[in-house]
Amino acid sequence: MDIPYQRHTLSNGLDVIVHEDRHIPMAAVSVWYHVGSRHEQPGRTGFAHLFEHLMFKGSAHHPNGYFEALQEAGGLVNGSTNTDRTNYWEVLPSQSLELALWMESDRMGHLLPALSEEKFTTEREVVLNERRQNYENRPYGLSSIALGEALFPEGHPYRWVTIGAPADLVAASVDDARAFFRTFYHPGNASIAIAGDVEAAEAIGLVERYFGDLPTGPTVMHPRRTTRLSAEARLLLEDRVELPRLSLAWHTPEMFHDDDAAMDIAADVLSNGKTSRLYRSLVYDARLAADVSAMQASREMSSVFHVVATAVPGMALSALDDVIMGELERLADSGPTSEELERATARAEAQFVYRVQTIGGFGGKSDQLNAYNVFTGSPGYMAADRDRYTRATARSVADAARRWLREAPRVALSVVPRGRHDLALLESQQVFPQ
Amino acid sequence: MIAVDRSRLPVSGPPRPFLFPSITRHALASGLDVRMVPHHAAPVVAVAAVVRGGSSADPAARAGLAAFTADLLDDGAGDLDGPGLADVFARIGAEADIEVWPDATVVSITTMARYAERALQLLADLLVRPRFAAADVERVRGLRLDRLRQMRAQASTLADRAFTRAIYGRHPYGHPGIGHPASVRATTGDEIRAFHRATCSPLAASLVVAGAIAPDRALMLVEQTLGAWRPSAAAGFAPEAVQAEPASRGCVLLVPRAGAPQSELRIGQVSAPRLTPDYHALLLWNAVLGGQFVSRLNLNLRQAKGYTYGVRSGFDFRRLRGPFSVHTSVQTTATADAVSEVLREISDLGGPRPVTAAELARAKAAVGLGYPRGFETAQQVARAVAQLALHDLDADHFEQFTSRLNAVALDDLPAAANRHVQPQALTAVVVGDPDVVGPQFAARGVTVELVADDEE
């Protein structure tokens, strides 16, 4: 399974990738900028994401909002920001491909004349609402903030969450936004992928026409920093929750590393479905937990492996911790069984097939082509990506679990209902994430 | 190269033709309605069984029975226990996707085309041969009670629950699909087995096979795997209780959540069924009001006022009258303002600011032009055809959708909307900090009724 494509790089540095797929009369446009929250500075966190919002507010030649014209063309439009990149996409009837390219090029080249103080202030309120809705007002919503602050030292670019700290958002100014645009938003730091009901040469010609005259900008410095924990950190967070939850986290290798795939397989063996080790030992056979999940959260500089389990009412988190650490020991000692490895690789293989079903949107083919292009330099990296999973052995998974989980310190966060410190791991230090 | 004209947006050409999936129907001797839909975009097959009933079939004292029963289907069926089933599913890169809707239980499996036969065997096991072992019933009961407990801390869940109860009361749509702690505790294994026998029948079901598989092969596999499925003697679910007409209240209800940093809002009423002749008019009216990003509600509450991250409105079309609702999460300090703005936007549509011709044209384009996007994957196609089956819609429904949409006239909208949404009948539910929110409503002279999150 792969995604056939044609690639062309404009003289201003913009990468263009086109994939033809005529199953529905729709075209998908995906624009990636290689900038995320890790490019922010302490004290100005949340800026990459706030800036993403501003990109929808209008550009010099279309100053009053980006949604309406695309929506009226029958298009879906969205964008997202994470630690490493910001993406924007449209999936729209293919006869309107030029409309999407006109708009994407106008905001890539001509955003600032349309950016006003008023737009900036309103959108900042929207983002503060987003943060309260998805973090403060959501059970366990502040966990990711507490984990980041324990996993990464002061100043490390992965220390803060992408949504940012409210105080930083309030302190941000429209001048910061202008400087941010000039630094990161230009053809040399972008990649555009088009997939769907299009003809490749024609689509490349259109991109040349709409984006060809945009000037490139300064070379972007991409932070490269890894870190390790020197000792275990135990934290306690009180929250408006009914059941206590234990979140464990370890540093692991970056996206596309062989051990990154091995940790993906470890996560599958540990928590995917009723055959998985942690589900059986915590939920299915004994009723210690209401749920459990393990996940390798892959990122560009370095990744984090998470195990999260929610205790049944009245159960202390230390009971869950004992079982989890026992299972990790066992995995590090002898790796997955052949049956477990077969299941995990079958599931991984299937995921690669399911991933080529949609042309655009989050995770569609245009998004994947850009991901491979921006992170590896090769839009055709899918085959190599998949090979990491077929190469994995019981031995390589055991080795990865030993090296990254057993022999390395962890962060252990106990989230407990207010006043129930007794349910947390012993000697946890209470935190108050902002 | 032609220079780009940035003085105006490029004009799009006419829509390119799209062939909607062709559906082959066949009734098995058992009465099972089978629909085969070839779709060759990827080597993937999606099978979906729609069994009419769903959470509205729950007996009054056993809220959550349909969902409890459905949850157990993949916990042991045929020759395999739960982990045994999970192993087989994993080997075909699939999992059982079991959903309980108000009107139906839907069991679907998406897998690679080469495993289509295995997927249908598994589907048959889940539908026809679930074990409902006593130990599994107890384990799943515990999980569901834990889940109910966790839901008490979720503002959005509290809002949904209070809203549904307020507008539907004792109507079969009035309880949450998961049920209540008391009903989940009281449910017995015998009741689950009896419920399954009574409701899960080929006479109440439609089976959709969509994807990279020829219709005749799909039908042969269905005959092999589900041909022997017969209605049990106990079968006889009749949704007579569902005929009760729900009552609407028209008031502001406050579920207190001390110190809440945002207020969750649900505003709406019991509204239209799926088969209303006003269906297309309501889709367009809602697109203007709050069905999409650029809509009156979102432009007002998010873009102009900055009260919220987003606000949406929508009709949940069901076999009987489903809810119309506006949902959002707003700043605590702007709660009463947000409620009054939502109410004003809705009543303005029926009064001083009706939908304009330009808004209608834009809504038609937005809803109609993007329609083929919903037929991209085998899973989407299977779900779309499952909707046809559930609602007894005509086979040409997809082909006709855009022309029916375009046939809606500006004059049709106020009457259509007025038949299904009456501003004076709207109920507003607020989940928020009573100390901050209460005085806001009091200052406006709005009576607020405090409601507890009683789980019954």
Image: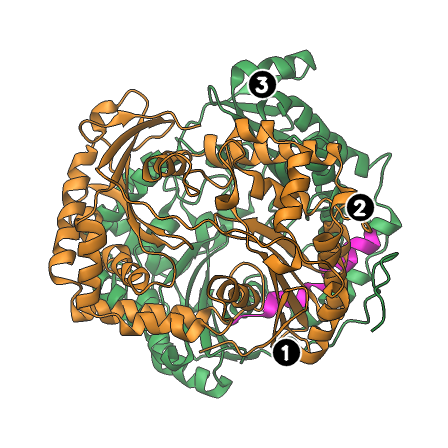
Chain colours: A orange, B green
- Label 1 sits on a secondary structure element that is loop
Mark-to-mark CA distance, 2 and 1: 33 Å
The amino acid type found where label 3 is placed reads: Val
Looking at the image, residue B279 sits to the left or right of residue A434; the answer is right
Residue labelled with disc 2? A63
Residue labelled with disc 3? B437
- Label 3 sits on a secondary structure element that is helix
Kindly identify which chain the residue marked by label 3 belongs to.
B
Mark-to-mark CA distance, 2 and 3: 36 Å
Categorize mark 3 by other alpha carbons within 10 Å: few (<14), some (14-19), many (20+). Answer: many
Residue labelled with disc 1? A22
Kindly identify which chain the residue marked by label 2 belongs to.
A
Residue stretch in magenta: B360-377
The amino acid type found where label 2 is placed reads: Pro
The residue closer to the viewer here, B429 or B103, is B429
Q: Residue at horizontal 30%, vertical 68%?
A: B89
Categorize mark 1 by other alpha carbons within 10 Å: few (<14), some (14-19), many (20+). Answer: some
The residue closer to the viewer here, A319 or B429, is A319
Residue A217: image location, x then y, percent: 66, 54
Image quadrant occupied by the C terminus of chain B: top left
Q: Are marks 2 and 3 in contact (CB under 8 Å)?
A: no
Q: Residue at horizontal 73%, vertical 67%?
A: A97
